[in-house]
Image (cartoon, rainbow, N blue to C red):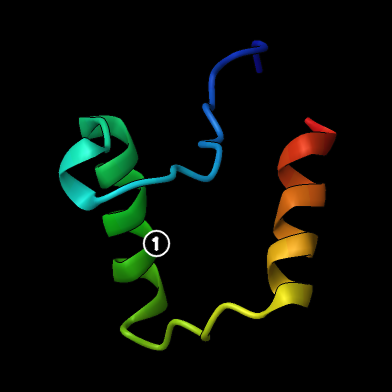
């Protein structure tokens, strides 16, 4: 597997129309995979996600 094959999006800030097409696609993918069971964001979940994203 080559480096750079997968792009992990950083947390976008701003309204939906200010997101890039790639950022919107990632969000939609997550929605599809979760089947509408998205957990509500909490401080601990946001921190855990940031740690995962920043580790790469």
Residue 51 position within the rendered picture, expressed as x and y whole percent measured from the top left: 82, 49
Name, please, the residue furthest toward the left.
17
From the viewer's side, name the closer residue of 25 and 44.
44
At 41% from the left and 76% from the top, the residue drawn is 34
At 33% from the left and 69% from the top, the residue drawn is 31
From the viewer's side, name the closer residue of 51 and 36.
51
**Residue 52 higher or lower than 10, as above or below:** below
Residue 9 position within the rendered picture, expressed as x and y whole percent measured from the top left: 51, 36
- Lateral position of residue 7 relative to residue 53, left or right: left
At 55% from the left and 37% from the top, the residue drawn is 10
Name, please, the residue furthest toward the front.
14
Where is residue 22, by image quadrant? top left
The N terminus lies in quadrant: top right
- Lateral position of residue 56 relative to residue 34, left or right: right
Q: How many dots with numbers?
A: 1
Where is residue 25, by image quadrant? top left
Label 1: which residue?
A: 30
- Lateral position of residue 33 relative to residue 42, left or right: left
The C terminus lies in quadrant: top right
Helix, strand or loop at disc 1?
helix
At 25% from the left and 51% from the top, the residue drawn is 15
Mark 1: few/some/many CA within 10 Å (<14, 14-19, 20+): few
Residue 14 position within the rendered picture, expressed as x and y whole percent measured from the top left: 34, 47
**Residue 10 higher or lower than 38, as above or below:** above
Where is residue 41, by image quadrant? bottom right
């Amino acid at each position: 597997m080559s480096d750079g094959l997968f792009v992990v999006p950083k947390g976008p800030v701003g309204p939906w129309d200010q997101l890039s097409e790639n950022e919107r696609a990632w969000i939609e993918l997550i929605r599809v995979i979760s089947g509408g069971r998205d957990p509500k964001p909490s401080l601990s979940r946001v921190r855990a996600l940031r740690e995962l994203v920043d580790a790469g």
